[in-house]
């Protein structure tokens, strides 16, 4: 691989960083008030009943404004899920830098990334998964 070429891992990190930046920007742009987010809950529109993820966008908007109490009121899963996205955003930056600087040790960087990302994923998503599948 030429010294200037990016590895597949680095390219994936850049793509994820762009997507995560979009999620965080969306949360920052739209205020956490009712009817201010352009993407409605399809489940609620079809059934008339809220789903476990209703209010998640407003919860994220509250979290980015450091209004933790309101974030949990909008959706009790919101703070943990936002934490996952925010930590992943930081991880993508850190692991991209590490991958570029430690090319010879990229497998170690990737393994560390997988372990840490899996841990934060389970911390953030297990409560929501348990609610969705009722176990």
Image (spheres, grey):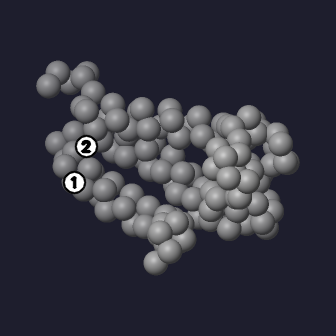
Where is residue 37 shown, x and y percent of the image?
A: 76, 39
Report the side of 45 relative to 99 (left or right): right
Q: Circle 1 sits in a helix, a strand or a loop, which is it?
A: helix
Res 76 visible: yes
**Crowding near the residue tagged with mark 1, few <14, some 14–19, many ≥20 C-alpha atoms within 10 Å:** few
Image label count: 2
Q: Residue at the spot x=80%, y=62% of the render?
A: 70
- Between marks 1 and 2 in the image, the one whose residue lies nearer the viewer: 1
Q: Name the residue under label 2.
A: 102
Q: Circle 2 sits in a helix, a strand or a loop, which is it?
A: loop
Residue 120 lies in quadrant: bottom left
Residue 8 lies in quadrant: top left
Asked whether 109 or 134 is in front, the reply is 134
Residue at the extreme front of the image, as rendered: 47
Report the side of 65 relative to 84 (left or right): right
Name the N-terminal-most of marks 1 and 2: 2
**Gap between marks 1 and 2, in whole Å?**
9 Å
- Looking at the picture, does residue 103 appear above or below residue 114? above
Where is residue 104 shown, x and y percent of the image?
A: 17, 42
Circles 1, 2 touching at the beta carbon (< 8 Å): yes
- Looking at the picture, does residue 57 appear above or below residue 79? above
Where is residue 23 shown, x and y percent of the image?
A: 60, 40
Res 59 visible: no
Q: Residue at the spot x=37%, y=46% of the render?
A: 95
Q: Mark 1 points at which residue?
A: 108
């Amino acid at each position: 691989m030429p010294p200037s070429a990016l590895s597949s891992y680095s390219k994936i990190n850049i793509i994820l960083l762009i997507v995560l930046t979009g999620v965080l920007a969306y949360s920052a742009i739209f205020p956490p008030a009712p009817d201010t987010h352009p993407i409605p809950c399809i489940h609620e529109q079809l059934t008339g009943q809220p789903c476990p993820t209703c209010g998640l966008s407003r919860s994220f908007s509250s979290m980015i404004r450091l209004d933790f109490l309101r974030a949990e009121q909008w959706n009790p899963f919101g703070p943990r899920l936002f934490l996952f996205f925010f930590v992943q955003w930081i991880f993508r930056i850190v692991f991209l830098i590490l991958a570029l600087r430690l090319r010879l040790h990229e497998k170690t960087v990737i393994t560390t990334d997988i372990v840490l990302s899996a841990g934060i994923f389970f911390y953030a998503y297990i409560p929501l998964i348990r609610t969705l599948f009722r176990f």
